Image: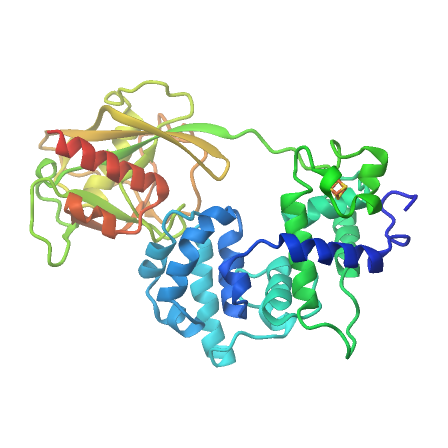
Amino acid sequence: MTESNDESNFDFSRARKVLLSWFDANERRFPWRDEPTPYRVWISEIMLQQTTTQTVLGYFERFLARFPNPAALAAASEEEVLKFWEGLGYYRRAKMARDAAREIVARFDGEFPSRFEDVLSLPGIGRYAAGAILSFGFDERFAILEANTTRLHARLLGLRSETTSAESQRILWRFAESWLPRESSRRTAGVYRRINGALTDLGRLICAPKDPSCERCPLAKFCESERLSLQSIVPVLKKKADPIRRTDVALWIAREDLPGAKNVFDLPGAERSPTDVLLIRRAAGSLWAGLWDFPRFEVGNASVSRDFSSDAFLSDRLQFFLEEEAGAPASDYRVGASLATITHAVTKYRVTLHLCQTTSARTNRAPKKERTLFEFKELPTNPNANRGKSTRPCARIASETRWVPIDKLREFPLSSPGRRIAELIAKLASER
Ligand code: SF4
């Protein structure tokens, strides 16, 4: 090939033979490859979005054992599906999978559809996932383009424009399709599944993001980046924005510290204890909606303090939650000093999360009535925006609130930071 981005001289026929013979010796084995039914391929593809293969391996079989087909997934409660998803992150995927399973049952009699348009019409399935399901699950002639194959194809072509641009995407998808031989009555069974699998594995194992192993690459003689030494500049990726730093507090509120909270309900079947912890189910529209968590509030990006007792804005939001949502008696609730700290990343944020307890001083004042409750629309980005205003709306953070014994926390589907907070609470409580 002499001209960058030009596939017209690319010898797909020879390259394919070399690629498949490399794949015969180097194929990665996964449970969804060993038994590639469309349903199993679909679940694996959803799990693999934003998550490493190593992590998915620990979840896949467990999920499939409990939800072996679309009907089982469709019949499950959202809470149960989330529990099986806990720790994988990006929980919207789990909810959409359940929604899609319900559509498969309602529209396709529980059988995974095999037409591209039907697959694409299901919630949570885009062009890549539809192609992956049809090629891996049905061995149909559909291309795929994910991180590994994008990098591999961009390097083979010597593509020097940003891979996410519309023009680059057009070039890359066409190149990915050109690897797949046209249908013929004499085609080898499994050929589309194998070619897409081989391209993915070669991208992952040999054409690594940094320091690709060109000396071991079976496609080196076909590769424009190898010919022109472009490996360090191709693929051209969009620059990632720096994460925004923010500080949150997660509250450890024990039953004994909040008597008379009339909207917080007991866990059915559990014995009451003064150490039971207040858990919320995160409100619709919020981050981690549907999962359980500890009451949690943003402090402000600039805060480096570990003492939040004088933060009036935080106290105001806490007070609103406790009085209006949890139904606690009117009081001057404050957030106590930080007991422990964890850090975690979520969407565009790098979060420092403090575990704190609450304090209260009984007052005779009436609960504040002037504020209006609204449903969460999105994660607030500027907690300082309303500072200084005497009245303001507050977002509802909970769709349910419960008293949960510390040893039952593990039974609830929690956000990943929520799980770490639960472990910290169990440890701190055992030391008291
Ligand atoms: S020769 Fe190097 S850059 Fe080219 S496809 Fe192979 S590993 Fe990637």
Residue 392 in the image: above or below residue 186: above
Depth check: 128 or 208 in front?
A: 208
Q: Position of residue 124 (x, y in %)?
A: 53, 60
Residue depicted at x 54% and y 58% = 45
Quadrant in the rendering for residue 68: bottom left
Which color scheme does this rendered protein use? rainbow
Residue depicted at x 27% and y 26% = 340
Residue 11 in the image: above or below residue 151: below
Which residue occupies the extreme bottom position in the image? 109
Residue depicted at x 75% and y 35% = 231
Q: Position of residue 180 (x, y in %)?
A: 76, 63
Evaluate whether residue 98 shows in this view: yes
Which residue occupies the extreme front position in the image? 25
**For this view, does 85 lie left or right of residue 2?**
left
Depth check: 67 or 94 in front?
A: 67
Depth check: 431 or 197 in front?
A: 197
Q: Position of residue 20 (x, y in %)?
A: 72, 58
Taking the image in four quarters, ligand 1 sits in the one at top right
Quadrant of the image containing the C terminus: top left
